[in-house]
């Protein structure tokens, strides 16, 4: 990598880390888009595999920041993540057999649907004291498995799906869903990255550059998330990011089909 591509990789990593810290999702979506369209990675599958690894590491860093803010529901996150790992293994295996540009186009469509649902529920505050128990565990497992399958198939950390999935399964507050989602984002990303690494579809140097850039971005994103956690502002930001990235991905990937 030359200095220009290192600089672009650091910038991309910073944006990814910031987004993960802010809304618990979007890291892989941004990373894949930036790798393909900004850094210039020629293979969408290599971009997906590299992004999955970098996002998993950056999500773990963001999780530490949210844990310090006491916004992580550990039991819910672990149950969700364990169920999702099973789905991610199957989804990522299937995703490698599908054309890379079609994957990007399909995921953009899914993002738009999730964004609309998030805006419709923006006034719902959720329960900050929610806990995972026998009553809601089946829903958490079901949503976790489904999200993991989507995450693995599209080669993304899944935060844009995990956050609304956690809220739907447990009715937890948005800020708690953001922090808790990073447990699953880390787990799903590592699972997907391992599958892609087995096929030689990871650029290890670029992944390291993304991780370094993401460390600084994550600290800033977590701090801002805390300030926007009241009044549904975080949900509006979440949905806005979804629509912006989805529109760009539809434009670029649609032209390549």
Image (cartoon, grey):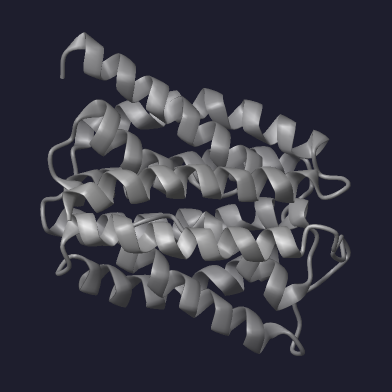
| Residue occupying the point 24% across, 44% down | 47
Q: State whether residue 212 appears in this view.
A: no
Residue in front for this viewpoint, 106 or 197: 106
Provide residue 118's location: percent of width, then percent of height: 68, 61
Q: Considering only vertical position in the picture, is 213 above or below 252?
A: above
In the rendered image, the vertical position of residue 5 relative to residue 181, given as above or below: above
In front of the other: 236 or 214? 236
Residue 35 visible at all: yes
The location of residue 137, given as percent across then percent down, is 68, 84
Q: Where is residue 211 in the image (x, y as percent from the top left)?
A: 39, 32
For this rendering, which residue is in front, 112 or 22?
A: 112
Say which residue appears at 21% left-offset and 36% top-offset: 204
What residue do we see at 18% from left, 35% from top? 41
- Quarter holding residue 170: bottom right
* Quadrant (top left/top right/bottom left/bottom right) for the N terminus: top left
Compared to residue 159, the image places residue 247 above or below, namely above
* Figure quadrant of residue 101: bottom left
Q: Where is residue 229 in the image (x, y as percent from the top left)?
A: 81, 44
Q: Place residue 199 in its image quadrant.
A: bottom left
Judge from the rendering whether residue 139 lies leftward or rightward of residue 46; answer left or right. Answer: right
In the picture, measured across the screen, residue 185 lies left or right of residue 126, that is left
- Residue 91 drawn above or below residue 109: below
Task: Give me the residue at 71% from left, 68% from top.
Answer: 167
Quadrant of the drawing holding the C terminus? bottom left
């Amino acid at each position: 990598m030359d200095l220009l591509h290192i600089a672009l990789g650091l910038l991309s990593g910073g944006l990814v880390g910031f987004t993960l810290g802010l809304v618990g999702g979007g890291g892989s979506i941004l990373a894949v888009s930036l790798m393909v369209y900004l850094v210039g990675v020629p293979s969408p599958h290599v971009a997906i595999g590299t992004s999955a690894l970098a996002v998993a590491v950056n999500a773990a860093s963001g999780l530490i920041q949210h844990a310090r803010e006491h916004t992580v529901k550990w039991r819910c996150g672990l149950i969700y993540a364990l169920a999702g790992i099973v789905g991610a293994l199957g989804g990522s295996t299937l995703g490698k057999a599908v054309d890379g540009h079609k994957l990007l186009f399909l995921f953009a469509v899914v993002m738009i649907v999730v964004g609309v649902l998030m805006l419709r529920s923006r006034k719902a505050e959720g329960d900050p004291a929610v806990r995972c128990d026998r009553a809601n565990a089946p829903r958490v497992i079901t949503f976790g498995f489904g999200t993991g399958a989507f995450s693995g198939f599209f080669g993304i950390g899944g935060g844009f799906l995990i956050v609304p999935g956690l809220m739907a399964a447990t009715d937890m507050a948005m800020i708690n869903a953001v922090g808790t989602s990073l447990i699953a984002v880390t787990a799903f990303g590592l699972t997907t990255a391992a599958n892609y690494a087995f096929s030689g579809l990871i650029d290890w140097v670029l992944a390291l550059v993304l991780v370094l850039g993401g460390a600084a971005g994550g600290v800033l994103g977590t701090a801002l998330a805390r300030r926007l956690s009241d009044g549904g502002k975080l949900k509006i930001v979440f949905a806005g990011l979804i629509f912006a990235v989805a529109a760009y991905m539809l434009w670029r990937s649609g032209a390549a089909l």
